[in-house]
Amino acid sequence: MLLLVVAAAFVFLFQGRQTLEGQRDDLATAVTGLDMTRTQLDLAFQSVEATRLATGQELATAIAEAILYEGQLVESQQQVDTLAGEVETLQGQLAASSTVTAATPIPSVVTVPSVQIVSPAAGTAVTVGQSIDIVFAAADPAGIATMNLLINGESFRSYDPNDATLVTIRESWTPADPGEVVIGVLAVNVDGRASNPTTITLTVTADTQSAALSQLASRDNAALRAEIESRVAQIRGLPAQVPVTTTLLSGAELRQRVEKDLLADYTEADAQKDVLVYAAFDFLPPDFDLYTFSRDLYSEQIAGFYDPQTDEFVVVSDDAVLDANEQLTHAHEYMHALQDQHFNLDLLDDDSLNADAGAALLALAEGEAMLLQMHYMQQGYVSITELLASAAALETPVLDTAPPVLANSLLYPYMAGLTFAQTLYNQGGYAALDDAWANPPQSTEQILHPDRYLAGDMPLAVALPPLTDTLGVGWVLVQEDVLGEFMLREYLSQQLNPQQVDTAVTGWGGDRFAVYAHETSGALALVLRLLWDTDKDATEFAALYPNYPTALFNATGQLQGSGGECWQGPADTICLFQTGRETLIIRAVNEGTAVRLRNEIGN
């Protein structure tokens, strides 16, 4: 069962950041215009020039803060206007006195910290014993010395931002008693100046009222979800054919679903087979616990999912109200629901698809959903401030410690898929994506190089014969499939630099790999047969691949009478055979076995 998931780490850290950087660029352009105007005041007076530069720095700082809290730019501009008035006054005074000395005092800018409580929203209702996250931020160009979180006027916790000019903090708090609670935040800058009072009031209810509040929140969420779905359908130009029912799960409930349902079709035996394949390509050690890692990674990273087989639509939320990130997740997953209704996402579970073609189709689905999210954000339907706060508070310890191949494989359909979808959209709008669904990409090469897809460059079919008899008694086939350009890049990237990888892999035409394991010794054998678009592409790969086993084994390759080259490692041998546009990489327990496998494939 293949789920269309949206990973929490990418909702705002990727396309959200792109949108924010665009806004930052617009603000930077405006600042440049202000600076150019200000330089025309009076370059002859050095003291006035110093004041103007100081003003420009204050304005630039204020602009940066504007990314986090709305309205800061207006406040900064007011400071600029005030200083401009002071500049004009100084000019008048200087002209009247007809003397300017180096000791002429320059007016200083006095600032106080700007503080905002990002979430929860004022008036939010919570129940006794319900943990909530309080997200708040402060900024001051002079630097923040201390921050305090206040509950009903009493200090709940103090923080030391180390004089940072921009601080975002996320703190968990659990109310113990019913009633109104005032949440306050106080910040003091390095000059000892305190922020203005910033508070919100929450309503804490007894457990007996939680059911009524839940029903009220459910009605509010239903209206919000309907609004999101209407916007998504309008942006994408695809009307809903049938209503979609949404399930809200808490993080704890999601972990239970991951263990009981989402991994129900993926057993520990399946995970161990995958580990053997990864180990044959040096991605993972043979004893890596992939099953447990997958469970932990899904539990951490899934912000929502859509199941094409059951039409189930799930958004993860730990409270009653959808925040900005959860709204964006809803938009992403609803895009998958529309894809399923119009283009049949059951194709993702088609057993006839090889692994590389399946990865390409997944990238089309996720890339289009990411593009839709970006357009949804650009139209101002979600709060950028809340998304930034979520990004600042996001913790991803499982993803941060993931082996590169697993982290990059999780990231690939979002990033590469978005680039692919954006390329098609730039050429023909969403109609071009309709055409892509009618003629889906067949390889990750087409995703990584959209021009190859548009040119109709289809992957070449490659075959391998059965090799168990050649290997001998006790050997069994673990997996046979298509590796594809994306995974070939991941493989070579373990020992080659990015430029070498790009030169070696570009021109991929098709491949087939097979991994075998010995039932008693646990030894592995790998065969990878590659076809290239041109002789030049094949030659470039053959010239660069030897760097891989040389670095892996710290060994020099030995030329073979059969025309190949082999590298002896501590426990096995890697051999490279090149003929025209065909490359054969064999990894076996010894050189003799590698040559026998090569001869069998040649026959």
Image (tube, helix red, strand yellow):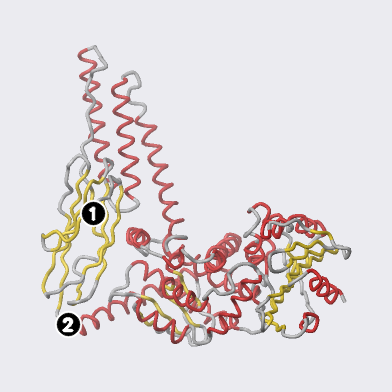
Amino acid under disc 2? Asp
Q: Position of residue 500 (x, y in %)?
A: 68, 53
Q: Position of residue 445 (x, y in %)?
A: 67, 65
Q: In the displayed orientation, state which residue is furthest to the top.
A: 98
- Is residue 334 in view from this perspective? yes
The image quadrant of residue 91 is: top left
From the image, tell me which residue sits under label 2: 207
The reply to whether discs 2 and 1 touch (Cβ–Cβ < 8 Å) is: no
**Quarter of the figure that contains the N terminus:** bottom right
Q: CA distance from mark 2 to mark 1?
A: 32 Å
Q: Nearer the viewer, mark 2 or mark 1?
A: 1
* Tally of numbered tags: 2
Above or below 309: residue 360 = above
Above or below 118: residue 143 = above
Closer to the camera, 166 or 322?
166
The image quadrant of residue 181 is: bottom left
Closer to the camera, 443 or 75?
443
From the image, tell me which residue sits under label 1: 159
Residue density around tag 1, few if under 14, some if 14–19, many if 20 or more, within 10 Å: few
Secondary structure at numbered mark 2: helix
**Quarter of the figure that contains the C terminus:** bottom right
Q: Position of residue 88 (x, y in %)?
A: 24, 26
Classify residue 89 as left or right of residue 63: left
Which residue is drawn at the image coordinates 11% and 73% (left, top)? 179
